[in-house]
Amino acid sequence: MTPGCIRTASVILSSMNSSVDPCSDFYEYACGQWIRGHPIPDDAPSVSNFENLGQDLEFALKELLEEKIGREEAIDRESAIGKAKFFYKLCLNESEIFDNWRTTFDEVVAAFGGWPSLGHQLQDDVSIEKLYGDMVAKFRADSLFKATVQPDDKNSEKHVLLIDQPALNLFARDFYVLAENEERLAYLQLIRDVLVLLHAPSESATFDAEEIIEFETALANITMADDQRHDIAELYTKMTLGQMKEQLPNFDWQLFFNEVFRDITSKNGTRISFDENAEVVVYGVEFLRRLDKLLPQFEKRRVVNYLEWCWFFKTMLRDLPDPFALTIFKFYKTLNLMNVQKVRWHGCVTRINSLMPMATSSIYVKHHFDHEAKKQC
């Protein structure tokens, strides 16, 4: 009997409540002691073995990312691991973020062509495809739809362009499609409060927040519910950009993808571009058909405001200190996602693990993986 087997048996036995008759209450018999021994933390909506493992991973990554920080020797910022550690160090420095975030924010918004909600004039020639392509390329800020590159599910040796429906900011589709509810009202208040913190006039902030919610609700209404998306093979559709142009004429897909890859070159140094023969895998083509009909129903100003709100919500808001941190905490508390604010390092580890998964995986495997076991595979 191995030590691992003994430890696992101990965990199982300590989780059981053997004083209960399993024929009367099997759940209490199997898990009663585990439930009493694992209260839900104030900074989490639930607790489970998977979440406990995730917490262990967070602590391990925190320790690894903090190596060398505070010493005189410089971090090698050219390597992926060095960049992850440097990013983590920057993320922890709230005072520097507080002093400098607005400069970075203003530069990015200016590069986008302005944010109408903040009083900037909407440019006559604004291109939704180019704006969204820029956001996806530089910030991975999915909002209208998810766009990525990944192995083809029907030929894993080949990578393909992939389109899927977006992840909604309110997490659950029902929060949008049902009647007015506490979660949706809290989200409306969050958008309005954040716009005011960004120096939008309070009256226009309320109006624009309502317009953003209206567009996002319309977007949620055309998404497929999760229980309709179990069969990947049924969702899978491969189309060329030429076919997408013909069948989905209200969005220039070729322009969008060329914008996403504008600053990326191939191995031989040539610029990557796509013609009408380029193939795209679409998961849920019906969603794209509905999106194609939806976009012309809204003026560009509202769509641009939605895109820029999603960019800020997904890439900057959660990294900023108070008063932004307090504002989003109130929102999460209403959604029962947490009752107390998490300490700063939790968010920094989560953020870096999301943005640089290959780097964090590499450093974790290097220090915590049994290399002898790998040789036996």
Image: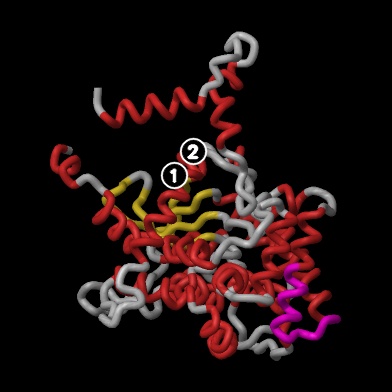
Q: Is residue 306 left or right of residue 162?
A: right
Q: Amino acid at mark 2?
A: Asn
Q: Measuring from the top left, give residue 134's x and y in whole percent.
A: 50, 77
Q: Is residue 200 magenta?
A: yes
* Residue 349, quarter of picture: bottom left
Q: Which residue is labeled 2 in the image? A: 49
Q: Residue at x 40, y 74 (%)?
A: 261
Q: Residue at x 67, y 50 (%)?
A: 172
Q: Is residue 141 left or right of residue 115?
A: left
Q: Residue at x 63, y 87 (%)?
A: 114
User: Could you tell me which quadrant the C terminus lies in?
Assistant: top left
Rendered position, 84 above or below 48:
below
Task: Mark 2: give few (<14), some (14-19) or many (20+) Cα within 10 Å.
Answer: few
Q: How many numbered discs?
A: 2
In the depicted view, which residue is nearer to us: 313 or 28? 28
Check disc 2 and report its element: helix, strand or loop.
helix
* Residue 182, quarter of picture: bottom right
Q: Amino acid at mark 1?
A: Leu
Q: Measuring from the top left, give residue 104's x and y in whole percent.
A: 53, 87
CA distance separating discs 1 and 2: 6 Å
Q: Is residue 135 left or right of residue 220?
A: left
User: What span is colored magenta in the figure?
Assistant: 190-203
Rendered position, 41 above or below 145:
above
* Residue 6, quarter of picture: top left
User: What label sits on residue 53 in the rendered view?
Assistant: 1
Check disc 1 and report its element: helix, strand or loop.
helix
Q: Residue at x 56, y 59 (%)?
A: 247
User: Could you tell me which quadrant the N terminus lies in?
Assistant: top left
CB contact under 8 Å: marks 1 and 2: yes
